[in-house]
Amino acid sequence: MRRSALVVAVALAAAVAVLPGAASGQAPESFDVLIRGGRVLDGTGNPWFRADVGVRGDRIVAVGDLAGATATRDIDATGLVVTPGFIDTHSHAGGGLASPGLSHARPLLAQGVTTVFVNPDGGGALDIAEQRDALLADGLGVNVAQFVPHGSVRRAVLGMADRLAEPRELDEMRALVEAGMREGAWGLSSGPFYAPGSYSDTHELVELTRVVAPFGGAYQSHVRDESNYSIGVMAAVEEVVTVAREAGVPGVWTHAKALGPPVWGSSVSLIERLEEARADGIEMYTDQYPYPASATGLAAALLPRWAQAGGGDSLRARLQRSDDVERIRAGMIDNLARRGGADRIQFRRFREDPAIEGRTLAEVANERAMDPVDTAIELFRQGSPSIVSFNMHEDDVRLLMAQPFTMTASDGGLVPWLEGVPHPRSYGAFTRKIETYVNDMGVIDLETAVRSMTSLPARVYRMRDRGEVRVGAVADLAVFDPSRLHTGSSFTDPHHLSAGMRWVLVNGDVAIDDGAFTGVLAGRVLRKNRQES
Ligand SMILES: [Zn+2]
């Protein structure tokens, strides 16, 4: 018994050994795609090594010296690095990817991104199967992994009610989360900062996250408070630790930041807390987009949450009642101070008055000869503008980035070309991390940056076959010269694709070929615990 097992093992070892190289006397090995002569950064954080990478179908089938091999498609990677395709762990591109004009995902591919996690912050599609169909309807330029969004689940059961859930309602929510996980979602996302997620308590988040645990799912949260709005950023991150511990899943404090001057510098104690939790056996992580500014709605940034209870119509009704307006105004004055003032808020998109797009609240208020808070109230009466909010300190950004448990996320979306003045992260988050924080500032090295975009998210979300350059992994690959990466996307002029990606492969298909889009739509919707994930 033992002997025959040994024979099999030896035979297998011999078979594996001849696989990579074309042994003399045999026909040369052939591949669909062969990337020759590059410096392989395998995604684990290891230093680069020189190797050829052979792809057959959608898999990497050989990594090593493949000099004698032939290929349908030869790629000369001399002087370039070969990395796994990048994984964006927090993306608002779900809606765009499901629309015909944007499903190509070019702004993402141009950054080397080959997989995005959608439905973050507790928002997005409730019906995971229906969203999958919509995503696949026109083809997909990149792979998509879906979260079950807590806010959408809560809204389906409790509407915008500002109260805790009854036991029966909690059961209904559990059933919705489970249905999403059965469809192949990767975990629960939450946004207790936003209404209606803000009306939940920790118990509700723990109970719903318990549902994703048996599926191997994770919990990703836009925390209840990134500043000192309500419970404070320390307690808000502690809530993620609690959920991760109680539910027994990886916990992700998403787009980590210390928002606003009153909490600048708290990254030091927040990191200590995460290290402590990890030492206690709680699997805590963060992700981050590499900018000192966030993007959100003016309402989320400035309105007290009670003013939003019941939804938009209720808000507009409150804005008609003078006593309510006074209370709202008082809350907004505090919240504007938290955001660092009116010159740190820049309008992104406002359909009701596009003239304000790209300008600051201070500028618009000045022009109207009004107080900034009153200007904001005027705008709420018209609609709901979206904003960029310059609220972070660069020291916090860099310190959080340098942590081994910090992944890379864009928090961006796919925006129709030339629409509004979006946050530049939609076009350049991954590029900027390498261009600015590796090349220019040296905050982290290239291996660390690539790891944070590849094998780390694959580990956190238990994505078995992606995020590494190794035999057997799916051939999501990026080939580029790191010193040539450039994002032309800025806060005032954002609509520019990233430059510098020479080749990008998605599931073995060439999506960028020597710098040019091929138009191939090779992306898939990745379903947790299914073969192809
Ligand atoms: Zn968020």
Image (cartoon, rainbow, N blue to C red):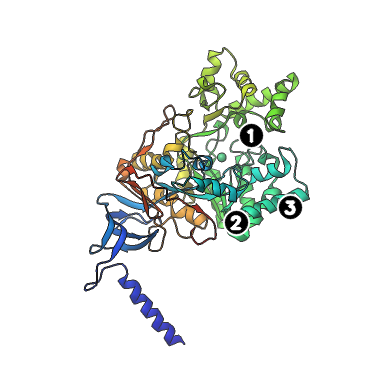
In this view, the residue farthest toward the front is 137
Q: Which of the two discs, 3 and 2, labels the residue nearer the N terminus?
A: 3
Between 413 and 332, which is closer to the camera in this rendering? 413
Q: Residues within 10 Å of mark 1 (few under 14, many from 20)?
A: some
- The amino acid marked with disc number 3 is Asp
164 on left or right of 410: right
Q: Position of residue 505 (x, y in %)?
A: 37, 51
The mark found on residue 427 in the picture is: none
Q: How many marks?
A: 3
Secondary structure, mark 1, is loop
Quadrant of ligand 1 in image: top right
> What residue is pinned by disc 2?
249
Q: Which of the two discs, 1 and 2, labels the residue nearer the N terminus?
A: 1
Question: At 21% across and 74% down in the image, what residue appears?
Answer: 25
- The amino acid marked with disc number 1 is Tyr
Quarter holding residue 4: bottom left
Q: Tell me if residue 233 can be seen.
A: yes
> What residue is pinned by disc 1?
229
Q: CA distance from mark 1 to mark 2?
A: 27 Å
Secondary structure, mark 3, is helix
